[in-house]
């Protein structure tokens, strides 16, 4: 860091199931809920997953066989919805995205008009988004059988879809009160309160669901999402692990735990979890892309390149192309990196593209071209300290002390916009012998972004370089307590 090089800091981001017969029925009912919901959404591959899981517990389940007979041929599921949910946890949950209804499948033409019949019809209307008729039939199901807990849950979902949250809350509670071990209504109720912005009740009902039914893996999953969204990574990871222990065939949990490990710089664990996720979705470009980024963060660039190329084979998007260019840069393949970057710039002028073009030229000792491209990056985004510092390094290599000092001074006067700017500034200060300013920059960043592990790691690296063992151990302990839960 004290050497006169062009500096660019880049951080990238089983269980044994045993139960009595009653518990088995409750668990398989929940699995059948999932299968039925996926079936109605034409997601046959996922429906078959849960049906097969039920068969391992109840090999003679008649309604499972009936539903399996309807699925021919099975279709390939796309992981896009799962991946978007895992990546963006702050979005309000829509009821149609979280509904899990329980409706026994049967030949309606041969069945009597009982509660199950009306429940089936209600679900059909619900899947068509005809919520008025769905409400009517779920009410009929309850009229015939006032103990039909699943019908109460479904009725609540339909009212929620109609924005009648008062009725939805009422019937979710009623559904659970009829069968305390049937906790899907409580999970749905938690998501309703999440949509309403009531975090206290959101968490309360998830914890209640887990207390009443410790095998409710979905409650653990949603509780993990809540914890991750607030930076409580140890709790998030613990909940995802419990979810996976109960239901090892729940891919959402593998992706979410992978992202949690990625965000806390536990890249080896992220790669393992992503591999498990790809066993469910072998053609997930996002999973390959995130694996590439994790491998890059570990400086395993050859491995990273393989994964990003696999992502590009599935989805030839600019984000993946840029990742390939960065990997080639770190591998020293500057010509290859430039080819990709120039191709990207033909479609869209981007400050980061120009920055990397400048870096490639600098490494090739084409200082004039490097200066031109760093200036283009600054023209497009003049609020990134690292662009000015990279430009300063060019002038330093030319022996132009005046312009070197000018652009270093400009870099340090820019107000950081994001946490990466704080990190860049800290290293700029350190590289110029101002260690106090470097630490202060990171302290200011931590007060603003307390859940970003990168900031703590940046401090750790500076203390390590300074051989300051006292502060190094202090920061290491903070990182272990706040972020690490393997």
Image (spheres, rainbow, N blue to C red):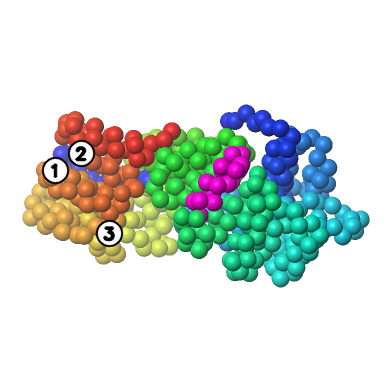
Q: CA distance from mark 1 to mark 2?
A: 8 Å
Residue range corresponding to the magenta coloring:
202-218
Mark 2 crowdedness (10 Å alpha carbons): few <14, some 14-19, many ≥20: many
- Residue at horizontal 71%, vertical 63%? 126
Residue 417: numbered disc: 3
Q: Which structural element holds mark 3?
A: loop
- The residue that appears at 41% across and 35% down in the rendered structure is 485
The reply to whether dot 1 and dot 3 touch (C-beta < 8 Å) is: no
Residue drawn at point x = 69 percent, y = 37 percent: 23
Task: Give the percent coordinates (x, y) of residue 417.
Answer: 27, 59
Where residue 462 is drawn, which disc sits there? 2
Magenta segment includes 3: no
Which residue is identified by label 1? 435
Looking at the image, residue 399 sits to the left or right of residue 282; the answer is: left
Closer to the camera in the image, 435 or 294: 435
Q: Is residue 380 left or right of residue 319?
A: left
């Amino acid at each position: 860091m004290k050497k006169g090089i062009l500096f660019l800091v880049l951080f990238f981001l089983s269980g044994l199931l045993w139960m009595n017969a009653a518990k088995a029925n409750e668990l398989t009912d929940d699995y059948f809920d999932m299968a039925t919901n996926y079936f109605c959404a034409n997601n046959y591959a996922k429906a078959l997953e849960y049906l097969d899981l039920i068969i391992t517990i109840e090999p003679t389940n008649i309604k499972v066989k009936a539903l399996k007979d309807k699925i021919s041929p099975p279709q390939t599921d796309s992981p896009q919805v799962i991946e978007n949910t895992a990546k963006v946890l702050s979005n309000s949950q829509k009821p149609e995205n979280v509904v899990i209804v329980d409706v026994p499948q049967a030949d309606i033409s041969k069945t009597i008009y009982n509660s199950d019949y009306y429940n089936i019809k209600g679900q059909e209307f619900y899947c068509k988004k005809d919520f008025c008729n769905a409400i009517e039939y779920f009410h009929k199901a309850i009229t015939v059988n006032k103990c039909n807990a699943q019908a109460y849950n479904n009725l609540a979902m339909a009212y929620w879809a109609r924005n009648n949250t008062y009725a939805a809350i009422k019937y979710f509670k009623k559904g659970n009160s009829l069968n305390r071990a049937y906790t899907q209504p409580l999970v749905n109720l938690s998501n309703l309160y999440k949509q309403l912005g009531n975090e206290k009740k959101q968490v309360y009902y998830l914890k209640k669901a887990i207390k009443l039914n410790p095998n409710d893996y979905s409650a653990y999953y949603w509780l993990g999402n809540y914890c991750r969204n607030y930076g409580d990574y140890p709790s998030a990871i613990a909940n995802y692990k419990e979810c996976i222990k109960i239901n090892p065939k729940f891919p959402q949990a593998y992706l979410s735990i992978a992202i949690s490990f990625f965000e806390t710089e536990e890249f080896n664990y992220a790669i393992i979890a992503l591999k498990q996720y790809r066993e469910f979705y072998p053609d997930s470009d996002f999973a390959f892309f995130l694996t590439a980024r994790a491998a890059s963060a570990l400086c395993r660039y050859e491995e990273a390149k393989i994964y990003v190329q696999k992502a590009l084979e599935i989805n030839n998007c600019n984000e993946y192309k840029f990742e390939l260019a960065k990997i080639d840069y770190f591998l020293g393949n500057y010509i290859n990196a430039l080819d990709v970057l120039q191709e990207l710039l033909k479609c869209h002028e981007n400050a980061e593209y120009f920055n990397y073009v400048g870096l490639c030229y600098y490494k090739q000792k084409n200082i004039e071209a490097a200066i031109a491209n760093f200036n283009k990056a600054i023209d497009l985004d003049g609020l990134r300290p690292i662009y000015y510092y990279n430009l300063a390094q060019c002038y330093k290599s030319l022996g132009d002390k005046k312009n070197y000092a000018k652009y270093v001074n400009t870099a340090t006067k820019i107000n950081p916009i994001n946490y990466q700017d704080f990190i860049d500034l800290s290293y700029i200060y350190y590289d110029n012998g101002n260690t106090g300013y470097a630490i202060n920059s990171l302290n200011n960043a931590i007060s603003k972004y307390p859940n970003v592990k990168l900031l703590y790691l940046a401090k750790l690296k500076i203390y390590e370089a300074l051989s300051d063992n006292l502060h190094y151990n202090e920061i290491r302990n903070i990182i272990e307590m706040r972020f690490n839960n393997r």
